[in-house]
Image: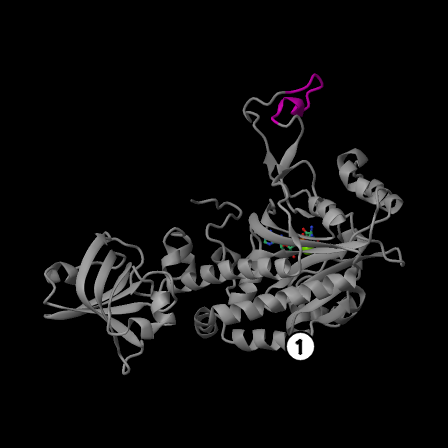
Amino acid sequence: LITVRELYKHPEQYMDKEITIGGWIRSLRDSKSFGFIVISDGTYFEPLQAVYHDTLENFQQVSKLGVGTAVIIKGVLVATPQAKQPFEIQATEVAVEGASAPDYPLQKKRHSFEYLRTISHLRPRTNTFQAVFRVRSLIAYAIHQYFQERDFVYVHTPLITGSDCEGAGEMFQVTTMDLNNIPKTEDGKVDFKQDFFGKPTNLTVSGQLNGETYAMAFRNIYTFGPTFRAENSNTTRHAAEFWMIEPEIAFADLDDNMRLAEGMLKYIIRFVLEHAPEEMNFFNQFVDKGLLDRLNNVLNSEFGRITYTDAVKLLEEHNDQFDYKVSWGCDLQTEHERFLTEQIFKKPVFVTDYPKEIKAFYMKMNPDNRTVAAVDCLVPGIGEIIGGSQREDDYDKLVARMEELGLKKEDYGFYLDLRKYGSARHAGFGLGFERCVMYLTGMSNIRDVIPFPRTVNNCEL
Ligand code: 4AD
Ligand code: MG
């Protein structure tokens, strides 16, 4: 079988020759003595049209085939200079591989994203989700390529862990205990000694702490894997299971970190524009009208940069427009992030040097003793897409900060060792993969860029 992508790539090789193609019927129009079948084989964004005539021995059967039927079509590829598509097949054989029942949920009309979420096993057969999930795949490939070209080592960090990297307490516990009959110690507490690992464990919220240990051995590393957060926030940008890319670079500071992040995002944009032009045009036309202009502008300018303190000053002037008023010390909400990147900078922006109180324990303290060397990257349409920092590399300062926050030294022995045996300046960040896919496709709900999304009250399929 030939693929539709191959036909579009090298039409001259197949023109006026007999080919065989397998795919699923997107639509079928029949009349008395001939008909048209539009099929998609999933390999290329554009479908392929086949014309058939009553010379087919199963003409009557073919004319009644339903949308979604899997067929194998043999015929001659002919140029159609007058039509929208550059060529079509003149079918000499249409074999039914698998019929599709008449209650097939995807009929030719347009379905809402809300409805398609209820059939996440069938939605990849639609135009929009063909485009989304091919682009998602390409972004993943581009990210690996970006880091591999720069000799970063890909590290597989564990999904089950005993630590809470972000200290936000939003973890899914992992246990084999019978929840209806939890073993207890003599003083009535849960006896984790009887659990599988002999201690409390959870699904990872970030691979960073493990990633840092490898950066102290390989210098430049990255992770790329699933992370889990039991955030009880029902928003369009939060999922309970999402993927994160976390590079970690040694002998590097916050500036190096931002350069790496900016280079990566631009690389991904360029890669996707080059490798998925049909899909990107589709998004630009049907999903997010200014998308291509916006992405091209990003490629032709530098990201903005502003400190948290200056950003707060700017935002305070617009407090009348916000539901949640800004003042120094508050965590920036999505509305503030979007205002900064959409109204003020009109491009991606790095916000740096946040108050230590609203950031994680591992970030390097700035000389002012109030802020840390943190950086968030905000983009139009979404807000935060990257969170990162330079790490505290001084043993005593890190221990002091952990004590302030009530973190137990013995839980982070391996992490403190890095500051004990050849500590080096280092920095890293986490890119939320789904938010990156949203940014590049213009899709506005994280549920529509994850094949099988997990969010509060939703774990279907
Ligand atoms: O800002 P976060 O929490 O940073 C970290 O986890 C650091 N350990 C990263 C590092 O320095 N190595 O998360 C990083 C990114 C966010 O900017 C966001 O894009 C994404 O992960 N993210 C989520 N994406 C979808 N659903 C959620 N619930 C997310 N939480 C964070
Ligand atoms: Mg963050």
The residue drawn where x is 53% and y is 75% is: 292
Q: Nearer the viewer, residue 335 or 53?
A: 53
- The segment highlighted magenta reads 184-196
Of all residues shown, which one is farthest toward the bottom? 82
Side (left or right) of 14 relative to 57:
right
Specify whether residue 302 is painted magenta. no
Q: Amino acid at mark 1?
A: Ser
Q: How many marks?
A: 1
Residue topped by disc 1? 301
Is residue 343 shown left or right of residue 398? left
**Residue shown at 71% from the left, 19% from the top:** 187
| Relative to 92, 123 lies left or right | right
Residue at 56% x, 65% y is 439
Instruction: Examine the rendering and report whether any part of residue 366 can be seen.
Output: yes
Residue 361: percent from the left, percent from the top? 78, 47
The residue that appears at 42% across and 60% down in the rendered structure is 113
